[in-house]
Amino acid sequence: MSHNHQTSEEEYFYKLNRDLINKQREKLDSDRASLQEEEMKKAHWMKCPKCGHDLREIELSGIKVDKCDSCEGMFFDAGELELLIKAQKPEGFFSHMQSTFFPKKIT
Ligand SMILES: [Zn+2]
């Protein structure tokens, strides 16, 4: 059997089916992608990227920082670092940071 025997009607329905399947496929793929994104977010949200422990949001002079209580890692949210850089007096932030992370003064 050769494709030359295919009538134009058959071709029409074949194409229609193929388009329909492609559309369904796209929808399934995007549904799966957003589901995966959601699952990934759930699994990693507010978790330390280094050690996997919970992150705690703390505020230092108006700048929000996520801090890991386990490995002492510190992470800036998007835009927070820019806020700090743009701030006129970052000294306030750094002295807050020092008293938060290094409360014991080494003399
Ligand atoms: Zn950590």
Image: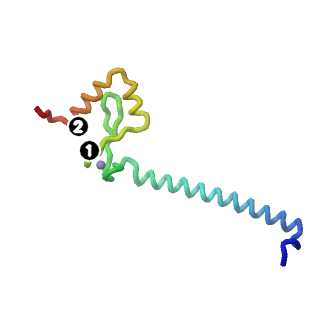
At x 43%, y 52%, the residue is 42
- Tell me the crowding category of disc 2: few under 14, some 14 to 19, or many 20 or more residues within 10 angstroms, Cα based: few
Q: Position of residue 107 (x, y in %)?
A: 10, 32
Indicate the secondary structure of the residue bearing disc 1.
loop
Residue at left 88%, top 65%? 8
**Which amino acid type is marked by label 2?**
Phe
Mark seen at residue 5: none
Q: Residue furthest bottom?
A: 1
User: Hey, which residue is sitting farthest left in the picture?
Assistant: 107
Q: Which residue is mark 1?
A: 72
Q: Earlier in the sequence, mark 1 or mark 2?
A: 1
Choose top left, top right, bottom left or bottom right for residue 30. Answer: bottom right
Of helix, strand and loop, which one carries label 2? Answer: helix
**C-beta proximity under 8 Å, tags 1 and 2:** yes
C-alpha span from label 1 to label 2: 8 Å
Which residue has dot 2 on it? 101
21 relative to 28 in the view: left or right: right
Residue beneath the point at 13% across and 34% down: 106
Q: Is mark 1 within 8 Å of ligand 1?
A: yes
The verdict on label 2 being within 8 Å of ligand 1 is: no
* Residue 14 in which image quadrant: bottom right
Type of amino acid at the residue the image marks with label 1: Glu
Please identify the residue farthest to the top as the structure is shown: 88
